[in-house]
Amino acid sequence: MLQNKYLAVIPGIILAFVLYTLSQGFNNVIGIEFFGYEKSPISTAMIAILIGIFFGNAFQIRELFQKGLDFTREYILKFGIICLGIQLKPFEFLEFGKIAIPLIVICIVSVLIVIKLIIKKLQIPTRMAYLISIGSTVCGTTAIMATAPVIKANKSEISYAIANITLFGILSMLLYPYFANFYFEGNSLFAGLFLGTAIHETSQVAAAGLIYDQQFNSPETLNVATVTKLIRNTFLVVMIPLFAFLYNRGAVKNNSYSIINIFPYFVLGFIGMIILRNLGDQFFSLENNNIYIWSKFIEYLKVLTTVFLTMAMAAVGISINLSELKSMGYKPFIVGLIAAITVGIISLIYIETLKNFFV
């Protein structure tokens, strides 16, 4: 019986992996072959969602695949987030942390306040507003997917929030490198901080930094933007439990819900991976003979992270019903636009204030 339960998820997992492979192939063709970049500026996760939406709406997915797709959305996603921690190196962040962390905190608080003020007027679901908030301020689609289970967001709310982040993230990715160079007059530190805080997805930040580097010959901007974005990603550890508590606080007050029940324990795995990365870096730097093995292990986990997260995005895409999405209207996009503008303006104000300490 137990064996049949495990076997039942295999077809759906295989389908999700096939869609990941397709999305990776399309990403390479579009980003590398068509646009001519060394590394595609387009998110593989975004393409996976689009392919999933196409298959989910063009064809009727058989019941054979449903359990595996549900497993992918719930558990393989969490494995991917845990593995994501191996990419974060807090000891390296100390150089920019004192500058970037206050900016990130201010951006998060500002967006939460602004969205709280407009949510009642626009009358959109609280869960969707939370998803748009964390997607705009922390790490885009990954943050949305990680937060959705702990606030019990439904598929339509998840898909609409992801559509928000994707749309405004792409626009920012294409426009902000040129704006940053003009506004900050070629200052690589300020431009990198702006790109790292004002753009949603990690891949979009990397792409914007790459565009800036290729257009204005500034690899330092790419480095600063990437490190700043990875610091933002670490706030996932704080924001997921916070949103879980905020959404369920009514139940907590009534003693019908426990903090233990709402705490997302996979976040502990994420923290564990960060600790493992730093301990490993410290240990293997002393063991030169084994540094190659450690580096390969990290690269393997990075690839695994991409595979797991992209599979989860494809599974989400398949579950999206476009007719349900259409029924939600335009109001959530207004929230997404306001969130994106708020993050950009707060970032500019902070950096302008910061200039006084560098002049």
Image: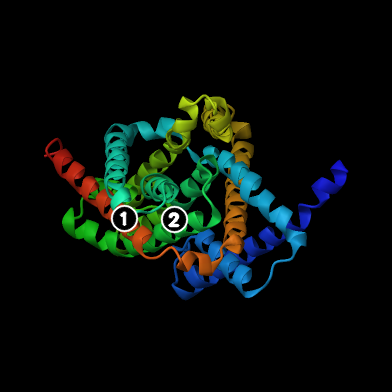
Q: Which mark is residue 83?
A: none
> Can residue 267 be seen by looking at this rendering?
yes
Q: Quadrant of residue 256?
A: top right
Q: Residue at x 54, y 32 (%)?
A: 262
- The residue labelled by disc 1 is 122
User: What residue type is disc 1 on?
Assistant: Leu
Q: Position of residue 124 (x, y in %)?
A: 38, 54
Q: Give the quadrant of the N terminus.
A: top right
User: What residue type is disc 2 on?
Assistant: Ala
Image position of 359 (left or right of 7): left
Residue 72 lies, with reference to residue 317, above or below; the image says above
Looking at marks 1 and 2 on the same chain, the residue that comes earlier in the sequence is marked by 1
Q: Residue at x 46, y 35 (%)?
A: 89
- The residue labelled by disc 2 is 161
Dot 2 crowding, Cα within 10 Å, few <14, some 14–19, many 20+: many
Q: Residue at x 40, y 54 (%)?
A: 206
